Image: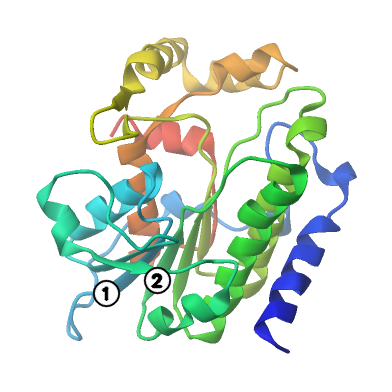
C-alpha cells in the first residue's frame, strides 16, 4: 500500500471512532480499559541503560515546540543522542547550550516519506504533536499524524514509543467543540496499544505550565498563572481533588496543572528505560511526580 493510502487509512480509522466512547473525565476506554490489569508506567523502578553500543538514539517529533523542546533538553541532559524533528527543521528560539547538542531535521508526520529515514537506528520516539483547529484538522494532527508515526516506528523496529496525550475534563458538551481533538488523541492511544502493547506509554497531562517562548523577545511565564492553582490543589490533597474533578463542569478547576519539566522528565524516562511497562500515566500520577 502506498504511503498516501496508508495516511488516508489512518485518518479513516481515527475519524470512525464512535462518539459514544467519549466518556468520563478521561479521553476514553483506550489504554486504561484495554489493559485493565497492566501496571502504569511509573509503578516500575527506572534502571540504568545499557550503553555498550553508545548512547540511545531518541527522536522527538514536534521537538521545536513548548513540550518537545523541553523533552529534547531533558534527553540531552541524560546523555542521549537526540534528533528533533519538526516541519521547519529549525531549532527553537531558546538560546541555551543544549540546543546545539540536538540534531534538528525537517519532517512532516502526515508525509511519512519525509521522516522514515530518520527512524533507522532509533531506539525510541517521543511524539509531542498535537493542536487545535477545525474538526478535520484536529483529527489529522492529533490522530492521523501520530498514528502514521506509530506505524512507521513499528515497521522500522523502534523499541519504544511515548505519546503526549491529554486529560479531557468532565465538561458537558465538550465533544461537540473538541470532538476532533478527543477522537484524534483516542485513536492514537489505541494505535499505540496495538503496535507497542508492552513498550508504548501515553501521558495524559492537563494544563502544562512553564516559560513558553513565543518570539525572540516575548516569553509567557505560564507558571505565574498555574503554579498557585497547583499549590492549592496540593494543599487540598490529590485524592480529594480527584473526587471533585469528577463533577461536571466545575470539576475541571480541580485538575492539577503539571510543569513542563515534569512532563519532559517522565517522557524521556518512559522512552529509554526498558523496565517501564507499556500503559497510561494519567494527570494524577504526573501530579504526584511533580512533587518529587
Residue topped by disc 1: 56
Say which residue appears at 35% left-offset and 52% top-offset. 64
Q: Residue 91, percent across and down?
A: 27, 55
Say which residue appears at 39% left-offset and 58% top-offset. 270
User: Dot 1, how many residues are within 10 Å of its Cα: few (below 14), some (14-19), or many (20+)?
Assistant: many
In which quarter of the view is residue 276 placed?
A: bottom left
Say which residue appears at 41% left-offset and 31% top-offset. 258
Q: Secondary structure at mark 2?
A: strand
- The N terminus - image quarter: bottom right
Residues at circles 2 and 1 in contact by the CB criterion of under 8 Å: yes
Give the farthest residue toward the bottom. 1
Residue topped by disc 2: 124
Q: Looking at the image, which is closer to me, 78 or 102?
A: 102
Give the farthest residue toward the left. 97
Q: Secondary structure at mark 1?
A: loop
- The C terminus - image quarter: top left
Q: Is residue 203 visible?
A: yes
Q: Is residue 184 above or below residue 3?
A: above
Left or right of 124 on screen, residue 256? right
Left or right of 127 on screen, residue 292? left
In which quarter of the view is residue 224 placed?
A: top left
Q: Residue 252, percent across and down?
A: 63, 19
How much space separates mark 2 and mark 1, taking CA atoms?
8 Å
Question: Mark 2 or mark 1, which has the lower sequence index?
Answer: 1
Q: Is residue 166 above or below residue 277?
A: above
Q: Looking at the image, which is closer to me, 134 or 249?
A: 134
Q: Residue 207, percent across and down?
A: 49, 29
Colour scheme shown: rainbow
Say which residue appears at 60% left-offset and 36% top-offset. 167
Left or right of 69 on screen, residue 150? right
Amino acid at each position: 500500500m502506498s504511503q498516501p493510502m496508508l495516511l488516508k487509512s489512518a485518518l479513516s480509522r481515527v475519524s470512525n471512532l464512535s462518539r459514544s466512547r467519549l466518556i468520563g473525565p478521561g479521553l476514553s476506554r483506550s489504554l486504561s480499559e484495554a489493559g485493565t490489569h497492566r501496571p502504569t508506567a511509573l509503578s516500575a523502578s527506572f534502571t540504568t541503560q545499557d550503553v555498550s553500543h553508545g548512547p540511545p538514539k531518541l527522536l522527538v517529533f514536534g521537538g521545536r515546540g513548548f513540550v518537545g523542546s523541553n523533552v529534547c533538553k531533558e534527553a540531552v541532559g541524560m546523555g542521549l543522542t537526540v534528533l528533533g524533528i519538526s516541519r521547519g527543521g529549525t531549532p527553537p528560539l531558546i538560546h541555551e547550550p543544549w540546543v546545539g547538542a540536538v540534531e534538528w531535521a525537517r519532517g512532516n508526520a502526515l508525509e511519512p516519506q519525509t521522516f522514515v529515514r530518520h527512524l533507522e537506528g532509533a531506539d525510541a520516539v517521543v511524539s509531542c504533536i498535537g493542536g487545535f483547529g477545525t474538526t478535520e484538522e484536529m483529527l489529522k494532527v492529533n490522530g492521523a499524524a501520530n498514528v502514521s508515526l506509530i506505524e512507521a516506528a513499528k515497521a522500522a523496529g523502534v523499541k519504544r514509543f511515548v505519546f503526549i496525550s491529554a486529560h479531557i475534563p468532565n465538561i458537558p458538551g465538550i465533544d461537540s467543540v473538541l470532538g476532533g481533538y478527543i477522537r484524534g488523541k483516542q485513536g492514537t492511544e489505541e494505535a499505540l496499544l496495538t503496535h507497542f502493547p508492552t513498550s508504548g506509554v501515553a501521558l495524559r497531562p492537563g494544563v502544562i505550565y512553564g516559560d513558553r517562548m513565543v518570539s525572540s523577545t516575548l516569553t509567557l511565564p505560564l507558571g505565574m498563572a498555574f503554579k498557585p492553582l497547583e499549590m492549592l490543589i496540593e494543599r487540598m490533597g490529590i485524592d480529594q481533588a480527584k473526587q471533585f474533578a469528577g463533577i461536571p463542569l466545575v470539576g475541571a478547576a480541580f485538575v492539577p496543572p503539571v510543569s513542563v519539566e515534569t512532563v519532559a522528565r517522565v517522557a524521556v524516562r518512559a522512552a529509554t528505560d526498558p523496565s517501564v511497562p507499556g500503559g497510561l500515566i494519567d494527570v494524577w500520577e504526573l501530579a504526584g511526580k511533580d512533587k518529587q
